[in-house]
Amino acid sequence: MWLVLGQDNDVEARWVAAGLRARADRPVALVSAAMLVHDCQWEHRVGTAGASSRLVLGDGTVLDPTTVDGVVNRLCWLGAEGFAGASVRDREYATGEFNALGLSWLESLGGRVVNRPAGSGLAGSWRRMAEWRGLARTVGLPVAPYDSDEPEVTTSETDRVVLVLDGEVIEGGGPTRPGLELTPASRDVLAALQRASGLDLLGAHLVTGERLVLRSASFLPSMSLFGEAGLDALHKALMNRRGVGR
């Protein structure tokens, strides 16, 4: 089966799960953060050979390396806020433990996961816009100027929006005038940014103009902007991950 993981209010995760169900030859389960925290039995083992997990959801669905062969990971955190009877201190402690457990579980699934966890995030490294801009410069991608004393502007209605998944660039929203299509060199530098980020999947907002300029990037792209092309790319990525472990 395939999993789509997201926060409780992640409408994009629901959209992705529905789109993959229409394409997949296997079940596609949408699993929210609240389900993992409040409606799940965890068995997690850590040994010299690494970590292994077996999760049983409230409806009896078993999630382990024998049943899961593809994951679209949009999780940001696993929080214990719902344990209203616990003290604030205990909830904070439990939140830290849940996030550590989630990191280890996702890492144990290895290459099956689109956007594997990192130390600073369940779905890969979380970066401020200044960090994204710095990373872009290392791969030769120009960035939009900004004033560090002003609130960050991460998007504009005139931006071109692209998705980069496993080195493939998919164009989505925003204006595209004749003669301003992305060149092979532009696609290569965007793919280089994706690889440098450690992510399999990222979204990028580009300043509309005659040259490629990055305004912002995100590890949680709005997949619905890319329609059928985005879903097709995700389906392809998950198919390529079949049978992949650590």
Image: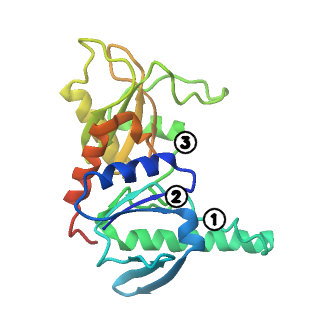
Residue closer to the observer: 51 or 140: 51
- As measured in the structure, the alpha-carbon distance from the residue carrying label 3 to the one carrying label 2 is 12 Å
Q: Which element type, helix, strand or loop, lies under badge 2?
A: loop
Instruction: Name the residue: 60% across, 30% down.
Output: 152
Q: Earlier in the sequence, mark 3 or mark 2?
A: 2
* Real-space CA distance between mark 1 and mark 2, rounded to the nearest whole angstrom: 15 Å
Above or below residue 97? Residue 6 is above
For disc 2, the marked residue is 120
Identify the residue under disc 3: 128
Q: Relative to 59, is 113 above or below?
A: above
> What is the number of the mark on residue 8?
none
Quadrant where the C terminus is found in the figure: bottom left
Q: Position of residue 204 (x, y in %)?
A: 40, 34
> Which residue sits at x=25%, y=44%?
232
Q: Earlier in the sequence, mark 1 or mark 3?
A: 1
Q: Residue at x 77, y 70 (%)?
A: 84
The reply to whether discs 1 and 2 touch (Cβ–Cβ < 8 Å) is: no
Q: Residues within 10 Å of mark 1 (few under 14, many from 20)?
A: many
Residue 79 disc label: 1
What count of labels does the image hold?
3
Closer to us: 224 or 161:
224
Q: Would residue 48 be found to the left or right of residue 239 on screen? A: right
Q: CA distance from mark 1 to mark 3?
A: 22 Å
Q: Quadrant of the N terminus?
A: bottom left
Question: What amino acid does circle 3 point to?
Answer: Arg
